Amino acid sequence: MSRDDLINQLRAIVGEKYLLLEKEDVIVYEQDGSILQAMPEIVVLPGNAGEVAEVVKAAKRAGAPIVPRGSGTGLAGGAVPAEGGIVLSLARLNRILEIDLKNRLAVVEPGVINLDVSKAIAQDGFFYAPDPSSQAACSIGGNVANNSGGPHTLAYGVTTNHVLGVEVVLDDGRVVWLGGRVADSPGYDLCGVFVGSEGTMGIVTKAAVRLMRTRESVRTLLAVFDRTEAATKTVVDVTAAGIIPAALEMMDRLTISAVAQAVPGVYPRDAEAVLLVEVEGLTETTERAIRLVQTICERSGAREVRIAANQAERQLLWKGRKEAFGAMGLLAPNYYVQDGVVPRSRLPEIMKQVAEIGERYRLRIANVFHAGDGNLHPNILFDMRAPGELDRVIEAGAAILKACVDAGGSITGEHGIGLEKKAYIGLLFNEYDLEAMARVRRVFDPEGRFNPAKLFPTPVSCGEVRRQPQTIPAGLWI
Amino acid sequence: MKLSGEALRARLEQELGAESVEFRPLFLEAYAVDGKSPGLLCLPAGPEEVASVLRLCAENQASVIPWGGGTSMSLGNIPRAAGVVVGLEKLAQLIEHDDANLTATAQAGMQVAAFQELLGQRRQFFPVDPPLAQLATLGGIVAANVNGPRRMQYGGVRDLTIGMKVALATGEQIKSGGKVVKNVAGYDLCKLFVGSLGTLGIITEVTLRMAPLPDSAASVVAAGPLDRCARFVEQLSDGPLLPAAVTILSAGGNAQTPAVATWVEGFEEAVARQLRDLAALADEAGLASEALRQEPHRRLWEEVEDFGANGEGVLFRIAVPIGAMGEILATIDRWSGEAATPARYVAHAGTGTVWLLAGNDPSSLGWFPRLIALAQGHKGHVVVAAAPPELKAGIDVWGPAPASLGLMREIKRRFDPQEILNPGRFLGGL
Ligand SMILES: Cc1cc2nc3c(=O)[nH]c(=O)nc-3n(C[C@H](O)[C@H](O)[C@H](O)COP(=O)(O)OP(=O)(O)OC[C@H]3O[C@@H](n4cnc5c(N)ncnc54)[C@H](O)[C@@H]3O)c2cc1C
């Protein structure tokens, strides 16, 4: 089928308005939250699952790749059309179809914004637990594809723990449900395998997600340290003491200095590190847990421990954390965020290594991350205009990932492999491990047309991927 | 060329040592699956040997039945063949307990109770409560997706399994996941193997999430008519309390009336508060309640966990949305009242799983289509979790096939092209 035929068919399916071909229209879709870019040829915005299925069928007839796209906040280039083809935006499938509080579940379309699910049920005392820092913008479909996490996934689990079932469009346009509305659907857990497959198995057109009841009590504490090691050691000690906070976040000196400019008065400017710890549950539990955390912090040498006395103080402590990513811009023109993860017991040593890597590559690294999960987010600061600097940044990033793997960890805790890290997946998996994954891929997508050149370590065969600074919309934090 | 049974045995003996290959029928009877005795029992000493056995069996198209503790062997359809049982009892090492990371890695043949004991030395435990924990192995409960009452608080096996090593039917050894609690590198193949009942590969090692041993634990048993029990559960789930398990127990056995058992654990002051609030809730619902600690608490839950696990009847597992529990149980009670011998159940109200035990006679199968219709009315499903082989013949114990069966078939074909692993035991004859 010729390109013109394909375009005519797509136009017939979605209508003129929702088919984008001109450079000024498609350029919006050339990048996600990563530094990678490729100009799309065709962008379609179907309005319902039936249209998605028709688009997929047309693409199959034309042999064209399909790149699903949610809100484009992904940090691994997952939604970047590296091999050309059709960018399929799910943004118009944005309805919450059902909220069933009695059964603690909601059925939503993939374009629904993460935060809107929690907003829709907050007044009834419920929430949707996975809360990526990008939750004001990212879509449930993107969350499912990337198996996204967030600050509060420490206690409640990541996306895969909260998705009961998904409706997906397969490569031939068939629409099937994987999983269901209750646990333990008989047969292989295809829903579990699909979550985290980064758009390489099919298109999510509906998701049934679990809802949780808001906890009766929340306590939040800020601990200030003069030594990074004392802070990381505290994280290890809290976990070892059997306390599982709802969130346990860490920021280092560079990050704190940026935050201190952006949100003055929250964190002491001269601190080496701060920990933000939150516990949730019954009042009796949180009272005791927050005191225990306080004791552990003090024992490890925290110079100050501040427990939020009320909601306003709590929000202020979080405000510093939430502004951290935006404040990076005060430190350097550009930054590159990594997502390595280590066993929590190895945090102190990995943080030392990250600092050493920064020195070795003569780069400043600002850390702000989900410490309780062992999930690092080193932000490597640089200036795009300085010749050769980006290459050094990429090398330093790779060195950090290698160090994480050597410590028994992984190269990505929540952002995914996408385009960005596919060259490093071999650090974790050998050819047999990858072949097992490829077998599953072939079951779902025998022709390899869903999001080609992602996740697997195959080279990009055509098309051109460029690197550009990250452009993060306001209101998001990492 | 395919070897004869004799020759295959000789090759396996060569590979594993003669003492690790059993062929005497008398010894093999204990490893019968649905009445089918295997031709051989192999006891590989490590993952390499598991892979070798699989490779040899694949080359010779001999069927393979992986065997952990044997506690879930009545789950599944009758196998088409039971050639070689691969027992995992020699893969029983704890590899690492990283307590500061709240994870542990162990070989698949390790028994759950033994595992718990080692973890307990550092005040942690693996928060799954399988039936017959003395016998059940880690690999077995992962492969069979066995969960217990406290899933409500801690999540299920699929949530707690973060890494594994698997020997594939084709002889390769692979790994998936790792020992970090957050990990999105590559496909999450752990999910594929959890609950796959040994039909895609043999799990040789698992990495699991641990939980700290609670300071204190206790239960409240509130007894009375079912509608009041259901109201109690509803009130409880609408309120702030965070129990570890909430289980409705039918009347029958020693119990005159149904009852709700609620397990609470954590800091003592939180336990004490929950006991108080639960007693008040029971009062409001018109139920007579009693708090249990120590031995009585422990015994109660052991009984719940082992419910139906000793082959005493036909056992159904019904999964329904939690909000439908009261209605489902009321219907079951009505049907049970009309039956010649009443059925009994334990129903985990926090997760929507009902275990229903009917007598060991053909009439019990009459429950199956009715339960399927009942569950499907709520978009749930039913599995026959255990039954004597003569009752299983001719039915699919997994219930009606889902629309995704075609994809599952393709998965099976690509992982086990010769269908040597547990042939026919999984749904749709996979
Ligand atoms: C400031 C900032 C903070 C962030 N914080 C976090 C965080 O705390 N935790 C975290 O996990 N991530 C975080 N992220 C990363 C990102 O927000 C998540 O990966 C998110 O889930 C992506 O959603 P999206 O809708 O933007 O997806 P996109 O970026 O559009 O796409 C992501 C991937 O999903 C695929 N995809 C999208 N929709 C579908 C669908 N319907 N069916 C199949 N495949 C689909 C795409 O092809 C792509 O591979 C952050 C990003 C930013 C910019």
Image (tube, coloured by chain):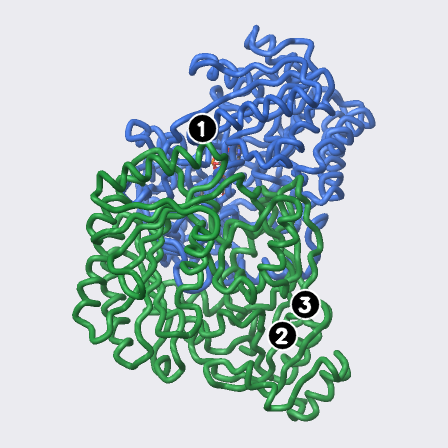
Mark 2, secondary structure of its residue: strand
> What whole-number distance in Å separates the C-alpha atoms at marks 2 and 1?
47 Å
Q: Mark 1 Cα within 10 Å, few/some/many (few <14, many 20+)?
A: some
Q: Which chain is green?
A: B
Disc 3 chain ID: B
Asked if marks 3 and 1 touch (Cβ < 8 Å), the reply is: no
For mark 1, what is the residue? A284
- Write down the quadrant of residue B218 in the picture: top left
Chain A colour is blue
Q: Secondary structure at mark 3?
A: loop
Q: Residue B172: which numbered mark, if any?
A: 3
Distance from the alpha carbon under mark 2 to that under mark 3: 19 Å
Q: How many marks?
A: 3
Distance Cα–Cα, label 3 vs label 1: 51 Å
Residue B188 seen in render? yes
| Quadrant showing the N terminus of chain B | bottom right
Q: Which mark is residue B87?
A: 2
Tags 2 and 3 both on a single chain: yes
Q: Disc 3 marks which amino acid? A: Glu
User: Which residue is drawn at the image coordinates 61% and 72% (left, top)?
Assistant: B169
Q: Is residue A139 above or below residue B419?
A: above
Q: Amino acid at mark 1?
A: Glu
Dot 3 alpha-carbon crowd within 10 angstroms: few under 14, some 14 to 19, many 20 or more:
some
